Image (tube, rainbow, N blue to C red):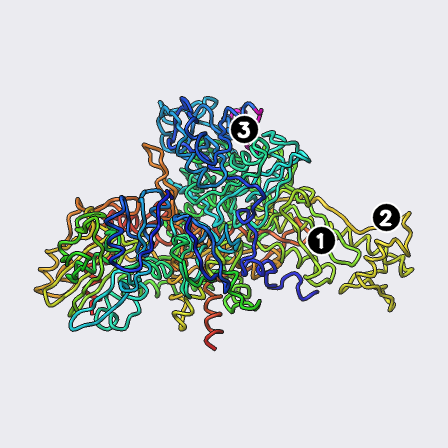
Amino acid sequence: MYQFDYHRPANLKEAAELLTKCDEAKILAGGQTLIPTLKQRLAMPSDLIDLGALKELSFIKAEGDAIMIGAATPHADVAVNADVRKHLPSLAKLAEGIGDPAVRHKGTIGGSLANNDPSADYPAAVLALDAKIHTTKRLIEADEFFKGMFETALGEDEIITEITFPHPKRAAYVKFPNPASRYAMVGVFVAETPMGIRVAVTGAGQEGVFRVKEMEDALAKDWSADAISGIKVPAENMLSDLHGDAEYRAHLVTVIAKRAVAAAI
Amino acid sequence: MPVVTMTVNGKSVSGEVEGRTLLVNFIRDQLNLTGTHVGCDTSQCGACVVHIDGKAVKSCATLALQADGADVTTIEGLAAGGDLHPVQRAFKEHHGLQCGFCTPGMIMTAVDMIRRKPELDEKTVREELEGNLCRCTGYHNIVKAILAASEEMRA
Amino acid sequence: MSEWGIGKPVRRREDDRFIRGRGQYTDDINRPNQTHAVFVRSPHAHALIRSIDLEEANAAPGVLAILTGKDVAEDGLAGLICGWTVHSKDGSEMKAGGHPILAAEKVRYVGDHVVLVLAETKAQALAAADLVLVDYEPLPAVSLKNSTEPGSAQVHDEAPGNLCFEWELGDKAATEDAFSKAARTVSIDLANNRLVPNAMEPRAAIGDYDAGRDEYTLWTTSQNPHVARLVLSAFVGVAPEHKLRVIAPDVGGGFGSKIFIYPEETACAWASKKIGRPIKWTADRSEAFLADAHGRDHLSHAELALDEDGKFLGLKVKTKANLGAYLSTFSAAVPTYLYGTLLSGQYDIPAIYVEVDGVYTTTSPVDAYRGAGRPEATYIVERIVETAARETGFDPAEMRRMNFVKTFPHQTPVIMNYDIGDFEASLDKALEVADYAGFPDRKEEAAKRGKLRGIGFSTYIEACGIAPSAAVGSLGAGVGLWESAEVQVAPTGKIEVFTGSHSHGQGHETTFAQLVSERTGLPLEDIEIIHGDTGRVQFGMGTYGSRSGAVGMSAIFKAIDKVEAKARKIAAQLMEAAEDDVVLENGAFTVKGTDKSLSWPEVTLAAYTGHGFDTAEIEPGLKESAFYDPLNFTFPAGCHICEVEIDPETGVTEIVNFTAIDDFGTIINPMIVEGQVHGGLVQGIGQALYEHGIYDEESGQLMTGSFMDYCMPRADNFPGFKLGFTPTVCPSNPMGMKGCGEAGAIGSPPAVINAITDALGIKDIPMPATPARVWAAIQNSATPKAA
C-alpha cells in the first residue's frame, strides 16, 4: 500500500468538508473492495475518509411503501433485517450472498454502489427495483446512476447517504458466481414494482449493470420463465475471460433470468 | 504518526501506526499475537479472521485505525481463562486441522457462524465457509467439528 | 497394547498449540535487529537484462543493501541444482541450464528473481524496489505447446529446441509387437493441467549470520531442512555444512512445494552475512503464485492394445512434460521415474513403452506436487481403460477386474515389482459402498429433474517410500532415500525421538509417539518427537512422497529395537536373569515365569548411573540411532468411484457421491489417515473441476495469479466423502505400512472426468471441467441432451 492520510470524521458534514478539501481523497466505507485494491497498489489516494464513525448512515427504516437503507449499512444487517425480509426478501437474499460472512460484516451498500464494480450484486437490485440514491447533494434515479464499469453519476465531492427501495409486488435475484472469485459472473435481478417490470443484469456486461428491455416487455405480457426463454442478449456486449467467454455469459443471462422469474416472490 | 487504541482480548492496548497499517499487522507485529495469519493478499483465504465487537471480520481488509476504540478478539483470546472454547475442542476432537495455518481463522469464523445461526446443518456450514480456505483437510472434518460444536453449544 | 498404540484414533497432540494460536511458523519468528527483504522480479516471461540501475533505489529511506546477480557471482556462489539426473534415449545426460539465485543476464519467467532489496522495514524495501530500474530486452515467450516448434525462442542455450531430455522406458519392440497382434486398439489425447500448490502458509525465510561464531542459521518453510542445508552448503556454497543450521519450525502445508531449495531462502542466508543482520522474507500470495514450483502440466497421447476378449496386450504413451524455466530440485524425476513406472496401473499389461520429452518453457519451474508423476500416470491409465470399456461395451468395473494383477509379487514391464495387493477387494467394497447397482435408478431420477448424472471409476496404484537407495541411485537420484531416527532415553525414562521426517500437517508428533508408546508401554506425555532442525536432528531426508510412515517410522522402529535390546541386557543383569528371559511389557521389564520385574524408569536410571550392570560389557547410557533403507517401494492402491450431476443449462458439475476405498497397509491412526485422504481428494477433485495455472501463450504472463482467478476448492464444492480400507500388509517394512498422503490426489481426477464424460456421453473433456467447458461440450456434443 502507498502512504495516505487517514481521517475519521464524526459526522457527514465533516466528511463532506474533508472530501472537498483533500486533493485525491477517497471515501472508505466498509473497505472490503477498497482495501484489497490499495494492497494491490492499484490506487494511490492522498487521503482516506473513513465513514465508519458515522452512525447516522447506518440504518434501515420501513416507511410507507418504501425501505430506506443508510449508505453505511453493512450487508449482514440488510440480510437479517426483519423489514427487509418482509417487504424485500429478494434484497435480503442478495445481501446474504455478497462475499463471505466476514466481508458482509464490513462491506456496505453505499460502498458497493459508489464503486460500481461490474460484478457487484447491489447495482442489479438498485436498477431493477428502480431505487433512489440520495447523496449529500441530491437524489439520483437508478437509471441515471450507473455510467459503466466503475463509473457512476457521483460527483467528486458527493457522498451517498441513503438508498430508497420501493416494495415490489414480486422480485428475485439469482447469481451465477465466478467459480474462483465468487463474484457474480451473471447476476439477474427481476422485479415487478408499481412502476413496472424490470430485469437488471450484473457481472456479464462490458459496461457494468444493464437492463434487458426485451425481457421486461415479455414479462409484462406474461410473467413466466417461458416468456423469456427465447430472448438472448447480444454476446458482443458481454465480458469474456478465463472463466467464460461472451457467448457463454450471454447464454447464462437467459438461464439465470428464467430462474429468477421462477423464484420471484 | 496516529495512535490507535483498542481492547484486544480484554486488554486495552495502543500503539503508533501509519494510516495504511492493517489491523492484522498491528496484531501480529506490534502486539506479537501471531496466531492470526496472513494467507493471501486478496482477502479471500480467511486465515486472518478476528472478531471486532463480536463479529467476524478479515483483519487483512481492515485498517488498524478503523478498529480504534473497538473490542477485538483474536484466537489467543478465545479460550476464556484457559478453558478451550467448545469450537476449539471440537476442532481437536474431530481432526478439523492438519497444518494448523488456516485454523485460527477457521475457528474464529466458526464461532461467529454459530452465534449467528444456532441451527446449523451441513449445507449451511459449507456455504458459510466460503471465505475460509483450507488446503489440508478437504473441509470434511472442519464441517464435522463445527456441527459438533454447534450441537454442544445448543445443548 | 497401550491405549495410545497402533491403530487407535488418538487425538493429535500438536493441535493444542494450533487451536490456541500458539503455533510458531517462520513468519511468526522475529530476530533482534531484523531487516526485511523484497525481491525485484521479472515482469517479462523472457528477456535479456541490458542493465540494472540502482542509484535511486540505493538512496531510498531505510535501504541497507541492494544486491544483484553480480554480487552473487563475486561471492562465488553457484546456482541451484537438480538432484536427479535423467538420461535420454541416446544415453546422453539431460541438458541442465543454469539456475541462478539472481538472474544476471537473462530472465526466464514472470517472477524470476533479479534484484534483492534489503531495508529496515518491509514497506521501505517495497518502496525502494519500485525505484530499481531494470532495462530489459524482451524475447518471445515459450509455452508447452510451442516449445519444440521450429523457430521457437531458446530458454537455455544448453538445450537446443528446448529439449532437456528425451526419455524412454519399456520395451519398444515388444510393445509394437503387442499392437500388431491386437484385435483392437484405443487411443486418447490427454492434457494434465498445470496446478499451483498453494499451501496456505506462503513460503518464508529468515537468514541470520552470527559473526562471533561464524555460523549461519536459516529458518525456512521446508519439508526437508537437512536436504536444504546439504544443497546450500555442498552445491551453492553459502556456508560449510557444519556452519549452517537450518530450522523448519511449524510449517503450514507443503504438498511438495516446500521440498525444493529456492533462490529466496538461499539469498536470505547469504546476504545476512553481507549486511551483518538477520534478514526476513515472507512471500505474499501473489509471489507464491509466480515463484513457487508448480505441478503437472503434461500433454500426452496414449494407445492401448486389447485382444478380442478385452484383455490388455500393450500400452504406448508419448508425453511432453513442462519443466518450466529451470530444473527445480527434483523436477527431472517427476515426469520420468515417478511417472513412467506407474503406467501399468493395477493391470497385467505384458508390454509397455513410454517416451517423455522434458521441455523448458518460460514459466515457473515445475516440480513435485502432491502425487508427483503418479497422478499423471494414473490419469492416462484410468482414462484409457474407461475409454476402452466404453468402446468395447464392457462394464467399466468388469473390464478392470478382468485385467487386474491377481498374483504377487508381480513384475511390471516398467521397473516396478508390486509386492502385495488385493485390487478386487477394494473394487468390490467400493461397488458396494457407492451402490453401483443402484446407479441406473439414480440416473433416471436425476433426468426427471433435468440433471445429467454420470459415474466414473479409478482403480489406481501408486508407489511410495521411493527406495531402496542403491536402486534409485542407479536411476539417477543424487541422494539416498532412507530415513534416520535417534531414540534418546533420559535417566528418568522419558523419551526423545529425533526424526529426519518433517511434519507440516501430517501429525507426526502424535503418530510417531503412538509407535513409541506401543513399543515401550509409555504414555504419550512421556514421549517427545523432535524434527525440523539440523541443529538437533543428525540427518534426515524429510517428508514427501508419502514416505514418513513406511520409511521414517521404520527408522524409529529399528532404533527402538536397539534401545530395547540394550535395556533388556541391562535389566537382565540388574535382575540377575538370562537376557532371553527378560521381556518388555506394559512399561516394565519382567523375567519370564517369575515375579521379578523392574519398571522402565528403574532400568533407564540404572543405565545412566551405571550401577548394577557390567559397564565394561554394556556401555552406560541409553540412546540409539538407526538409518533405515527400505527393501522396495510400497504400493498403496484403491478404488475411487465418483458420481456427478450436471446442470445442462449452466454446465455446473456437482459431485453428489464420492467413494474412496484404499489399501494403505497397516494404519497407525485411522483418524489421521482419513484426514489425509480427505485432503488429497479435494486436491484431486480440485484438479479435475476447478484449478488451472494458465500462462498466456503470447505474453507468457500468469493469468491465474491470485485466488480471484485461480479457483481454490472451497467447502461448498464437496459432499462428505465415503471412505473405507481394504488393507494388505506391506512385506517390505517392519510395520507393513504403505503411505496415504497422496492417494486421494492420485486416484480422484480420472474418476471425476470419467463420471463427467459418462454423464455427457463424450470421450473427453479437458481438466478442469469448468462450467463453461462443460456447457460448451454439451453444445458441441453430437447427441442432443434433454435440458
Element class at badge 1:
strand
Instruction: Kindly report the secondary structure that dominates the magenta region of the rendered protein.
Output: loop
Q: Which chain carries label 1?
A: C
Q: Nearer the viewer, residue C162 or C630?
A: C162
In this view, A42 is above or below B62: above
Q: Residue at x 38, y 25 (%)?
A: C135
Q: Are marks 2 and 1 in contact (CB under 8 Å)?
A: no
State the image coordinates of residue B34 (x, y, percent, origin top left): 52, 53
Q: Are marks 2 and 1 on the same chain?
A: yes
The reply, left or right, for residue C435 in relation to residue C7 is left
State the image coordinates of residue C125 (x, y, percent, origin top left): 45, 37
**Residue C445 in which image quadrant:** bottom left
Q: Which residue is drawn at 80% across and 63% down?
A: C588
Q: Which mark identifies residue C496? A: 1
Visible in this render: residue C401?
no
Q: Can residue A113 be found in the magenta stretch? A: no
Q: Can residue C76 be found in the magenta stretch? A: yes
In the orientation shown, which residue stands out farthest toward the bottom? B155
Which part of the image, by quadrant, shows the C terminus of chain C?
bottom left
Answer with mark 2 or mark 1, whichever residue precedes in sequence.
1
Residue that label 2 marks: C619
In space, the residues marked 2 and 1 are separated at their CA atoms by: 19 Å
Q: Mark 3 lies on which chain?
A: C
The reply, left or right, for residue C763 in relation to residue C7 is left
The reply, left or right, for residue C340 in relation to residue C394 is right
Stretch in magenta: C75-94
Q: Which mark identifies residue C79? A: 3
Q: Are marks 1 and 3 on the same chain?
A: yes
